[in-house]
Image: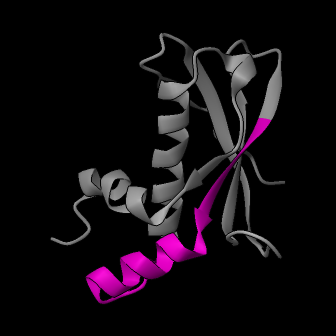
């Protein structure tokens, strides 16, 4: 059995969230962008859980690869998704309004900048 480690994040919105990673999967869309979806189990009260999907758009991954001369490793994709999750926590006014979040090409460098991947 795989034990999941609950992590905590204190959001700028004032809420404290607990979350853990569920899985990642490739999303193919007929209309719009596909990409890699990262699913997280999230709660702010340890009673009511919801699944939040963070989608790294395929266009964002390709743009990052073109700009940096290499593809992101799986751990780096996870890091981008986790930074997207934190952005969702920070920008959502209340836990009941958490929803899916798409990481676009314009946002990818901004989310990954604190990690210093180009060093």
Residue 53, image x, y percentages: 71, 48
Nearest to the observer: residue 78 or residue 97: 97
Is 87 situated above or below 104? Answer: above
Q: Residue at x 74, y 58 (%)?
A: 23
* Magenta stretch holds residue 67: yes
| Residue 56, image x, y percentages | 58, 63
Task: Give residue 117's position: percent from left, percent from top.
Answer: 26, 68
In the image, residue 111 above or below residue 28 = above
What is the basis of the colouring in this image? one colour
Residue in the foreground of this view, choosing between 27 and 75 = 27
What's drawn in magenta, residue-wise? 51-73
Residue 29, located in which quarter of the rendered image? Answer: bottom right
Furthest residue toward front: 31
Residue with the most extreme left position: 119
How many labels were placed on the picture? 0
- Left or right placement of residue 118 versus residue 46 in this view: left
Residue 89: x %, y % from top left: 54, 28
Q: Is residue 60 magenta?
A: yes
On-image quarter of the C terminus: bottom left
The residue depicted at 71 percent of the width and 69 percent of the height is: 32
Q: Residue at x 81, y 26 (%)?
A: 49
Whether residue 112 sits left or right of residue 32 in the image: it is left
Q: Residue 68 versus residue 17: which sits nearer the camera?
A: 68
Residue at 66% across, 69% down: 36
In-image side of 58 versus 110 (left or right): right
Q: Is residue 8 above or below residue 2?
A: above
Left or right of residue 26, residue 88 in this image: left
Q: Quadrant of the N terminus?
A: bottom right
């Amino acid at each position: 059995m795989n034990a999941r480690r609950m992590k905590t994040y204190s959001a700028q919105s004032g809420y404290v969230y607990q979350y853990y990673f569920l899985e990642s999967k490739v999303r193919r869309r007929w209309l719009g962008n596909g990409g890699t979806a990262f699913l997280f189990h999230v709660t702010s009260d340890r009673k009511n859980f919801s699944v939040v999907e963070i989608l790294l758009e395929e266009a964002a991954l390709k743009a990052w690869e073109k700009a940096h001369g290499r593809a992101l490793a799986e751990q780096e994709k996870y890091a981008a998704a986790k930074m997207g999750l934190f952005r969702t926590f920070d920008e959502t006014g209340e836990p009941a309004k958490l929803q899916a979040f798409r990481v676009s090409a314009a946002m990818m460098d901004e989310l990954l900048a604190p990690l210093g991947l180009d060093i």
